[in-house]
Image (spheres, rainbow, N blue to C red):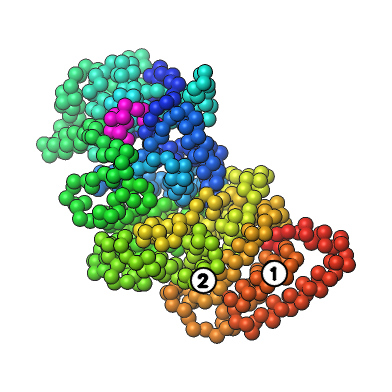
Amino acid sequence: MGVRGLVTFIEKHPQIYRDVRFMKSRLVIDGSNLVHFLYFDSDLDQNHGGEYAGFEELIEKFIAALRACEVAPYVVMDGGSDQTDKKLETVTKRAEDRIQKAHRAAVDGGKAGILPQLAKLVFIQTLARLEVPVARCFAEADQEIASLAREWQCPVLSRDSDFYIFDLPAGLLPISHFQWEGVKQRGLQSYIPCKGYNISSFCTLFNIQRQLLPTFAALAGNDYVKLETMDSPISWAQYAPAGSATASRLEGLLHWLKIFQQPQEALEAALQLMGGLTTKKKLKVQQGLALGMEEYELPPSTLMRFFMDGVAPPFPEEEEVAGLVPDWTWLPLTQSRLTTDILDVLLLKRMSLGFPVDHGNMPSACLTSRPIRQVMYGLLLGRGTQFHVEERDRDGLQLKFNPVHPTFKGVPKQLKLDSLDKAEPSQRLQVLLGALGVSQASLSCLPAHLHLPVAVTCYWFQRAQPTPDLGLLKALVLSIGDALKKGTAVQNYHSNLKPHVNVAHAFNQWQSCLKDSIHLNQLLGWPLPEPCMARLYEGTLVHQLVHTMRSGRKLRNFLKNDRSSAKLCRTMLSVIHQFKAQVAVPGTSQTQKKPTSPRQRLPLDDLTTNLQQLFIMYDDEETENEVISAVRAAQDLQFVDKVSWRTRHKAKERNNRCKNPELARKTECRGWDIL
């Protein structure tokens, strides 16, 4: 829920904290909080789509610091939206704020605290690779985190204000005071210097009973009742002690609560302060306050058995949930191997889309990937359904709720959600490839780990608006193909430089397509390997690459001198160009091929020029033959005359270089510059 302003208030009273040398302990981590803290507390760029390799490295260092101090981390993540919709007003307001912040960041290049679209996926993938235990909850994770920490008698790492209210035996380690980058030694033992918080210190400082803390949180404002919006709101600041330098709302409320021993008498007194409430209004306020206080009552942990034995926790007991979520999904959901977006679709018929840094004049980047989501909606809701999914997206700078209907095209009738995990792998693969409009044969020349990102790039190159130019495609291909020097070519590039509007929008669309394709791939049981996101896209570097190409400058500082990367990039470009040559005209189905004559296809000059440029860097007939084969696979043989001409030209050029060593040296230095 959160208590507005509580963390800031406590930071003004540092005597509440105690110094801690943290080591040799379990630690329950608020994962959703940690993602934001690690990314935003670093110098990682926020406005160019994410610096995922740098984020991965940061996560690795964080876990290494914990393990050096013999700390065993257990990460717990938030799940789907609250089924009661008690937070809908709060969530909607935050979404509206993010739209405005994302637009301002696109306009002025400042940091607005917008998490890149795939940062959470990088976080989950990195923790899985490091074998860190991770659990995702059914809904909000706060109660589960607190319950697990209570039963294990270990602290919680978070900055969420609710953990200042929960009665935790080992207390809270506020993440902003957790100096994991400054590990120290005491003898042979390493430890992390940090601050510890316990509600006993809070209650002693403000002289209130510990059983009144949930009452304090509820009266301060919660998701059930907004007391400040009542007809007769209470001005708690007027109850601040005389002579207080900062007569704040929370300070006044705490001072007022000092005279009470039990929650019920404090609640009754608060209702009296609200003046003439009608009986109906009074009952509603009482219920809201009671529900707000119940949020801090801790049930037995449902995650301890999962972490110890790998057993998924039971479904929530609410009747509206029973039967809507298939049993087979619960374990991968808890393991964070399946997106909890499916819970929102199944239970609320709703999908909350993200808002990357993008200019408000551009359409939503999520529109391009909507057909992919519609396939997922069809799998989740089933044929014959009358439901649609309400997508929360933006239109300009306004938040909109758009009805989106599921689609079943390309989905075999025998595929049912309840038994989707038992469907034939070939069927599940065909659904995924059909959604992207590519064939399995077209990807067969690529390594398995690149099948999904290249298929997504084919889809994006066909559907993105405005249509991406070849410079954008080349930048993506070089990044996906691991042909770029990470972390070196951007030294002179200002990461706070505001992104180019069209470039940012194009790459936002690509990330949205990749994210939705990964979610569909997860739902279908991973018919294609899930790509490592930290290796695919480096926002600042890719943006600079496009800027450099458009400025007519050379790329040698960006590119590895690596034959295998060059060959892989050539292959990817040929696959994407072949797809572009074969797909239907824009606006028609991606899976239907338009019968065309060879001369109606993608202009040969675009294809041969890009492929030929990729092989000029190496002087051998094997490479030339590879390119000729790629062109032949993409275009009819009658058009290969130009490649043959180029081959003859290259043979002549080789003879000239043999006679002129200086010319040969300059050509070798050129490397990848032709891109």
Q: Nearer the viewer, residue 631 or 407?
A: 631
- Image coordinates of residue 553 in percent, x first then y, are 72, 57
- Badge 1 marks a residue whose secondary structure is helix
Quadrant location of residue 208? Answer: top left
Alpha-carbon distance for marks 1 and 2? 22 Å
Quadrant location of residue 288? Answer: top left
Q: Which residues are magenta?
A: 142-158
Question: As displayed, is residue 166 above or below residue 537?
Answer: above
Question: As displayed, is residue 184 above or below residue 479?
Answer: above
Residue under the image location 42 percent in, 26 percent down: 24
In the displayed structure, does residue 332 sit left or right of residue 324? right
Residue under the image location 30 percent in, 24 percent down: 169
Residue under the image location 64 percent in, 63 percent down: 567
- Which secondary structure dominates the residues rendered in magenta? helix
The residue where tag 1 is placed is 622
- Image coordinates of residue 524 in percent, x first then y, are 36, 61
- Badge 2 marks a residue whose secondary structure is helix
In the displayed structure, does residue 356 sit left or right of residue 237? right
Q: The N terminus lies in which quarter of the figure?
A: top left
The residue where tag 2 is placed is 442
